[in-house]
Image (cartoon, rainbow, N blue to C red):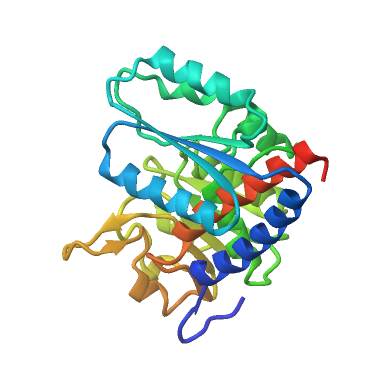
Amino acid sequence: MTASASAQLIDGIALSRQLRADVAQRAAQLTARGVRPGLAVILVGEDPGSQVYVRNKIRACQESGLHSVFEKYDADLPEETLLARIRALNVDPTIHGILVQMPLPKHIDPHKVIETIATSKDVDGYSTLSAGQVMTNAPGFSPCTPYGCMKMIASTGVSLRGKHAVVIGRSNTVGKPMALMLLQQNATVTICHSATADLKSHTLQADVVVAAVGRRNVLTADMVKPGAIVIDVGMNHNDEGKLCGDVDFAGVRQVAGYITPVPGGVGPMTITMLLVNTIESAERVAGA
């Protein structure tokens, strides 16, 4: 990978549009066979960010020909009532994916909620069994954000085989599965985190950097190898209140070969991969 005067943008909106067109086509084929792909979305409480995410997910479903069920509950919903509702959706043949929007009110154990969702409908890919399927490369559902990141890397046409990838962040939802998915594509993977000494020494060796820590400017131009692919998973706000990522975009863009913007990068891809996982679940049920 060679350096360029300015990195090529990996446009998450354009890539999402392509993938959603494919989802819509597959949804139409399934619906014609009598199987309408269905996603159930559950929201508990009044978190404003969650309400925006849920609205976007439901709109994406409708635009792609998926059937969506939205259930909103008050913040004082008893945990057992929520678990009982998930168990009912687990056996509902019209529902192929179940998503419970996080965060949940403090009295509800998110781990218990995630583990109650049937693995065959865990389209967020968050359960322990889903994580094991990612780890062993078994058929299952990959978490939507790292799955979207992999699609963005693939869109560059650069093979990951033998490349050095650095993932900054070790969360169960992004960092760890991201590292495993890169490994499955034959990259050599380093995971860095808050206790890593000299982050720069690692990132300077990387052909691919995925920044996923939720901290502004964790990756700056002097930390990037010329020509590298830089994927920015961060969602932060700058001093003016504008949305920005974990990467110093203006500086890093002058050094990297490819870079994702924030907004318009990983964000749209996360919702798109939720649709992809839901359609795959429906196809498995239909034997497609």
Left or right? Give the position of 14 relative to 239: right
Give the x, y percent position of residue 189: 60, 50
In the rendered view, would you say 50 is above or below 25?
Answer: above
In the rendered view, would you say 16 is above or below 143?
Answer: below
Task: Note whether residue 31 is visible.
Answer: yes
Residue at horizontal 56 percent and vertical 19 percent from the top: 87
Task: Note whether residue 206 is visible.
Answer: no
Left or right? Give the position of 151 relative to 196: right
Give the x, y percent position of residue 31: 71, 49
- Depth check, front residue: 146 or 68: 68
| Residue furthest to the left | 240
| Residue furthest to the top | 80
- Depth check, front residue: 61 or 246: 61
Give the x, y percent position of residue 176: 54, 40
Which quadrant of the structure image shows residue 102? top left
- Depth check, front residue: 282 or 203: 282
Residue at horizontal 47 percent and vertical 68 percent from the top: 260
- Depth check, front residue: 148 or 66: 66
